Amino acid sequence: MNILIQQKIQAGFAVALAFLLLTGASAWWSAQRNAETFRAVDHTYQVLDALEDTLVEMLNTETGSRGFAISGDEAFSQPYQTGIAAVQKEFESAKRLTQDNPEQQRRLAVLDPLIQTKIGFANEAVRLRRSGDTAGALQFIAAGQGRQAMDEIRKLISEMEKEEQQLLRQRTDKALTATRTMIAIVVFGSLLSLGLVGFARVLVRRDFEKLQQAEEALRGSQRRLTLALEAANIGDWELNLKTHAARRSLKHDQIFGYPELLPEWTYEIFLEHVHPEDRTRADQTFQGSVAAGRDWYFECRIRRQDGAERHIWARGAVFPDAAGGTQMVGMVGDITERKHAEDAVRKLNAELADANQELAAFSYSVSHDLRAPLRGIDGFTQVLEEDYGDKLDDAGRGHLARVRAAAQRMGGLIDDLLKLSKITRAEMQPRLVDLSALAREIADAWQRREPQRQVRWEIAGGLSAQGDPQLLRVALENLLGNAWKFTGKRADAVIQFGRLERDGRTVFCVRDNGAGFDMAYAKNLFGAFQRLHTTAEFEGTGIGLATVQRVLHRHGGRVWAEAGVEKGAAFYFSLPSETPAGENHER
Amino acid sequence: MKDKTILLVEDNPDDEALAVRALQRNNILNEIAVVRDGRQALDYLLDESQPLPALVLLDWKLPKVSGIEVLQRLRATARTALLPVVILTTSQEEQDLLDGYRSGCNSFIRKPVDFAQFTEAMRQLQLYWLVINEPPPQNRKSQ
């Protein structure tokens, strides 16, 4: 940008200078022309003078000769003599001065004989008088030949004077114009030059403004950088690789525990603060990178001035400086809190893993140990019934039946609980799942299991969602299984599975026209082992919907229901759509 | 028809009583031998002087030597490598199923709580393994 400004200034001044020179040259040339013109004007005046004098001397001659002819006074002969000489002289003068004017030369050529003639007449008059012939002289004069010649001379000279006057006017005009032109050139040229200078100034100022803005922006950037470093608790530093002396920000020294900037700081001082166990590694990393001209980064522990142990990260970058050497700049940040948080997270994760493992072990033992006594209860009750049943009455046998039923029911509950816990623990493997295909599989399976049932399935095509295929299968099996079960008493059972928009989101829906339920009790619907029907009406443990809810929650979705008694039920569930569920970063 | 012995490996006395009863009810004449832990099972099966049973019903959770260890030992020993072993257990843990089949069991049965079901399962089991199924030749040779 600087170069550009310089060039512009130079160019601007060069142009202005050129214009001034041009103006000067024009003015000088104009002045030359002016001088010529004025000389021409002066020349014309000279011609006029000569002509006028010619006439005057001619008249003098005439007057002298007539006077002498009339009075015989010698006093008149002098003007007559001098006149003749003067006329010649002036005539020659006029002739000389109008050399360049052919028209005037022609007239002068005509004038010459006329003058000679007139002089001849004057001479004759004087001769006559001198010879004593006064009457002859007077008669000669009265004859008017002299007067006639004089008139013609006058006329001719008048013509010549007119011509010269015209010439004079022309040249005067020309002189005036020339002068005006010169003035105009000077004025215009000067204005133009001024204009150019002004224009150049404007351009330069614009560039200067831009430069200023750039400087301002840079200052602003620096301010923001400083603020950012301050806010992030990052200290920055510059290290001179020759002297090992470092310039630092206040924050840098504060990180090492000094409230004010130390008067000096070197790499060695830095190393002293590093924890002894980390010192070698840090030093090796640093030296290695310096040798290779590479940037470096490491984390280590330091001991602050007050003895406190902190974790820091430090990074540096090398690059060539203006003087041809290498300079290193870098930053250092205190990450003690972060490290502690990371450790806490690691510990928590470990605890979580442990807890999960314990849970898994617990489930495992449950699956073995809790069921074994149940087998005993059921089994020996049956033995009792078989071996001693005849010794019991109906009531007794009824009791035994209830014991067995209770034991089997407990077995079922245990199984359901185990399944539910598996769903909570299982690792999710999200994929795009074809829900339509899944639903059709499940529907077909139910139909095969109970082929006598007449159920119309309306499963929409193209239903898909992002989620774990196994878990979603479990959820759909439960929902569709419920629909199948609760339409069991309908001859015209219809089960629908489709999709609709609610509040701008995609929601799936399993709907049936079966027994439904009373919405008043809906809040218990998804609780574990909660049922809204008795086992006599419809069998089941009440774990199905709890399982569905657990699956949906793991996917970050929701499930809810609407129903009416004997009006069927609709179960809606939402899955976060095509974008992967938040579960991903659990893995 | 030679009497085919069934070896029942079961530590729980209740389960044992019920299993024996179920097996006996089905009128398929078999001798039923019972051992109560993994150690005893191995001793019985690896005893060269004893004939091998036709079928082993192996519980998974056993004291001393566990079910899977027993199975692995059996499969590792030439004498018992092909011996039909049916695992009887409550667990339906996928890991147990994998371990069982990987270790070479012939079948995996989950014991139901319902005794009637269990009896029926035992009947079908006996029918299949002792009547329908052709045992591996090695069995006859050892007998």
Image: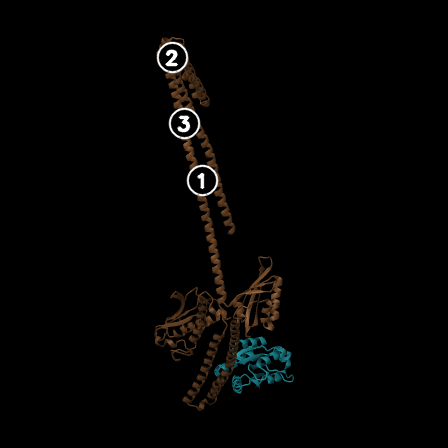
Chain colours: A brown, B cyan
Badge 2 amino acid:
Gly
Q: Provide the secondary structure element on which disc 3 rests.
A: helix
Q: Provide the secondary structure element on which disc 2 rests.
A: loop
Q: Provide the secondary structure element on which disc 1 rests.
A: helix
Q: Position of residue A370 (x, y in %)?
A: 49, 83
N-terminal of the two: label 2 or label 1? 2
Badge 3 amino acid:
Leu
Q: Chain of mark 2?
A: A
Can residue A92 be seen in this snapshot?
A: yes
Residue mark closest to the camera, 2 vs 1: 2
Q: Position of residue A467 (x, y in %)?
A: 47, 68
Q: Position of residue A174 (x, y in %)?
A: 42, 30
Q: Nearer the viewer, residue A58 or A31?
A: A58
- Reply above or below: A522 against A373: above
Reading the image, the residue beneath label 1 is A189
Reading the image, the residue beneath label 3 is A168
Badge 2: few (under 14), some or many (20 or more) residues near its Cα, within 10 Å?
A: some
Q: Nearer the viewer, residue A206 or A159?
A: A159
Badge 3: few (under 14), some or many (20 or more) residues near its Cα, within 10 Å?
A: many
Image quarter of residue A489: bottom left
Q: Let me know if marks 2 and 1 both belong to one chain.
A: yes
Q: Position of residue B2 (x, y in %)?
A: 59, 83
Q: Chain of mark 3?
A: A
Q: Chain of mark 1?
A: A
Can residue B111 be seen in this snapshot?
A: no
Q: Residue at x 39, y 8 (%)?
A: A132
Q: Could you give the CA–CA distance between mark 3 and mark 2, rounded to whole angstroms?
A: 43 Å
Q: Outermost residue toward the bottom?
A: A391
Reading the image, the residue beneath label 2 is A72
Numbered label attached to residue B63: none
